[in-house]
Structures are given as C-alpha cells and as structure tokens.
Image (cartoon, helix red, strand yellow):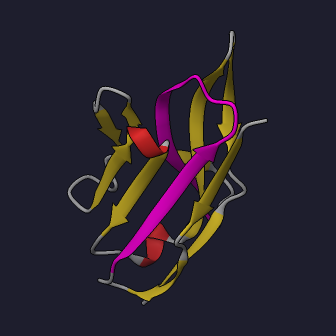
Amino acid sequence: QVQVVESGGGLVQAGGSLRLSCAASGSITSIYVMGWYRRGPRNQRELVAVITSGGSTNYADSVKGRFTISRANAKNTVYLQMNSLKPEDTAVYYCNAVITSGTYTNNYWGQGTQVTVSS
C-alpha cells in the first residue's frame, strides 16, 4: 500500500516563510512526478508547483520567484520552500505523486496541510 503524507503547514505573518514536506512510502517502484496543489477560500484547486524525477519544474505564475520545489528521489520526498508569503497564499496544500507500484501507476494525494498567512 502506498501512502503520501505532508507536513510543515502552519500560521505565519505576511512576508514570512514556511517549508512543506511530503514523503511517499510503501511498495514503490518509481515516482515520475511529485507536486503541490492548493485549495483556497474559493474552494478552487490550483497547481502550485510540480517536479519530475529528472528535476524539471513548473510553477504557477502567482508563486514564481517566491516558492521553490525540490525533491530527494532517494527518500521519495518533495519539498516546497515558500518565501515572501502573502495572505492570498492561505490555503490547504496537497501533495500529489504519480507512483508506479509493480505494474500499476496511480495518482496519489496526501491529506492536506493548512497554511495560513496573516496580514
């Protein structure tokens, strides 16, 4: 069984920083893409950042220059360093991973971690 677990959310003042972590565990053959999505007060899920096993990244325009996604392939872990946080970054952040286990490839989601940025 594969699990994806996030950690690192919390409350921070505008301009501050937080680092999110997400670890995948279980029967894992390979992980192609890992990434972060968020669901804000308007309840719309949006992509924040993704990274492939080769290190290619993609960011939402709203976070470019402020957030950095990185990955430790040997640990099946992805990180999101969030700097210069703004109140509009307030959301539940979800980790996503496309994981191959044996001959099956599935899309896995974490339970979410709350990030609240106060003004």
The picture places residue 54, in percent across and down from the top left corner, at 30, 26
The span shown in magenta is 17-41
User: Residue at 31% of width from left, 47% of height from top?
Assistant: 61
User: Residue at 69% of width from left, 39% of height from top?
Assistant: 26
Where does the C terminus fall, quadrant-wise?
bottom left
Q: Residue furthest left?
A: 65
Residue 45 to residue 7: above or below: above
User: Residue at 44% of width from left, 87% of height from top?
Assistant: 12
The picture places residue 46, in percent across and down from the top left corner, at 54, 46
The image quadrant of residue 106 is top right
Q: Is residue 104 magenta?
A: no
User: Residue at 28% of width from left, 33% of height from top?
Assistant: 55
Is 108 on the left-hand or right-hand side of 60? right
Q: Is residue 47 at all visible to an observer of this figure?
A: no
Q: Which is more toward the observer, 78 or 26?
A: 26
Q: Is residue 27 at all visible to an observer of this figure?
A: yes
- What is the chief secondary structure element of the magenta stretch? strand
Q: Is residue 23 magenta?
A: yes
Where does the N terminus fall, quadrant-wise?
top right
The image quadrant of residue 102 is top right
